[in-house]
Amino acid sequence: MPEGCRCAGIAGLGIYVPERVLTNQDLEKMVDTSDAWIRERTGIRERRIAAPEEATSDLAAAAARAALADAGITAGEVDLIIVATATPDTLFPATACLVQEKLGADRAGAFDLLAGCSGFIYALACGAQFIAGGAADTVLVVGAETLSRIVNWEDRNTCVLFGDGAGAAVLRPAPREKGILATLLGSDGSGGTLLQLPAGGSRLPASQRTVQENLHYIQMNGREIFKFAVRVMGDAALEVVRKAGLSPEQIDLFIPHQANIRIIDAAARRLGVPMEKVVVNVDRYGNTSAASVPLALADARDAGRLCRGANIVMVAFGAGLTWAAAAVRW
Ligand code: ACO
């Protein structure tokens, strides 16, 4: 953070994952795939699937309540709610407004942010700027997804990869040299069609034809996304470490977006961080997009891996194409 600005830190963390577990063995009965293929190519063993009555705002509100409780503050103290999601309840109103209502956060502004799987770190960077500039004291940042609703359950190329969940962080002013030390955001719209949900927007409104042609489901060029991810994850992490005035050896914990264990391995190698410093939970949750980084962060906290003063680097890539990284001192 530049001189004279307030630093923002994470004052509370909360998560919510749906109860229903969908294992690779379950998927073997749905599409032509195998547990061995999924584990070897992705590292995923199981993922969570939202109940029929649950939508993204329900997951987001549950995670937000847990984060507020963890921070020891009430909903009435929240100035701003940012919900990062690619699976909003509806195109409008914003899911953040639904969360505001569910929490009873009656003083808060609220908006959604769409940056694919990079969404949580984008929202973290955004919330930190509101605090740095003095426009807000307490920002609730949520990454929440119900990807199960936009996955084609007959397409083995995509349906094995994704899961549902939500993670939330409360941002508040932090002492200098603590909290969010540096952030980095990137995008390359020329790769937008590599990972997209083609129908339902103004370009291709929903119609019988779009449904018949499955254009309301995720479409992905897995190989190209893989190459892109391996390149940007390592580069963005290295760049944010440099911006924070750190060296890779000073990283205590590396929290990459949980899309694929092979992408995580490659990013850790590029950064020069050994795997014992890397948080991995892709085996239990699959790719939960904007929820992935906060779910991993909370896992690290629950495992006692977030020590006071630890240097943490988070990095993600996603639809857009986008990438984002943050260096945080705990
Ligand atoms: N079970 C069995 N076989 C499968 C499955 C499956 N579930 N899925 C694909 N295959 C087959 C393919 O059809 C292909 O067969 P073919 O050679 O006969 O055509 C073969 O396996 C190999 O396919 P590849 O695409 O080369 O497999 P790869 O090793 O690249 O793994 C994967 C595919 C897992 C999708 C990988 O490319 C990947 O992880 N890409 C990144 C995806 C990602 O992270 N997306 C999320 C982005 S973030 C966001 O914003 C949501």
Image (cartoon, helix red, strand yellow):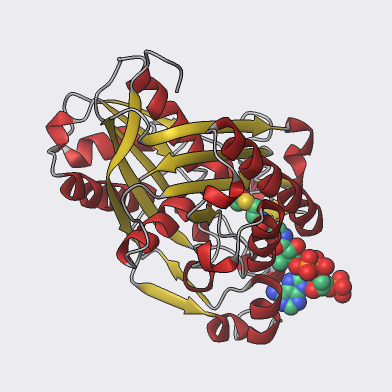
Q: Residue at x 37, y 38 (%)?
A: 95
Q: Residue at x 68, y 42 (%)?
A: 198
Q: Nearer the viewer, residue 274 or 62?
A: 274
Q: How many marks?
A: 0
Relative to 73, residue 294 above or below: below
Q: Nearer the viewer, residue 256 or 275?
A: 275
Kindly indicate the quadrant of the structure image that contains residue 242.
top right
Relative to 70, residue 94 above or below: above
Q: Nearer the viewer, residue 185 or 204?
A: 185
Relative to 251, residue 132 above or below: above
User: Which quadrant is home to the N terminus?
Assistant: top left
User: Which quadrant is home to the C terminus?
Assistant: top left
Question: Residue 48: x, y in percent?
Answer: 43, 69
Question: Residue 197: x, y in percent?
Answer: 65, 45
Left or right of residue 308, residue 213 in this image: right
Q: Is residue 213 visible?
A: no
Left or right of residue 64, residue 25 in this image: right
Question: Residue 302: x, y in percent?
Answer: 31, 64
Left or right of residue 49, residue 137 in this image: left
Q: Residue at x 34, y 30 (%)?
A: 8
Q: Residue at x 65, y 32 (%)?
A: 186
Kindly indicate the quadrant of the structure image that contains residue 204.
top right
Kindly indicate the quadrant of the structure image that contains residue 73.
top left
Question: Residue 322: x, y in percent?
Answer: 65, 38
The quadrant of the rendered image in which ligand 1 is seen is bottom right
Q: Is residue 313 visible?
A: yes
Relative to 49, residue 316 above or below: above
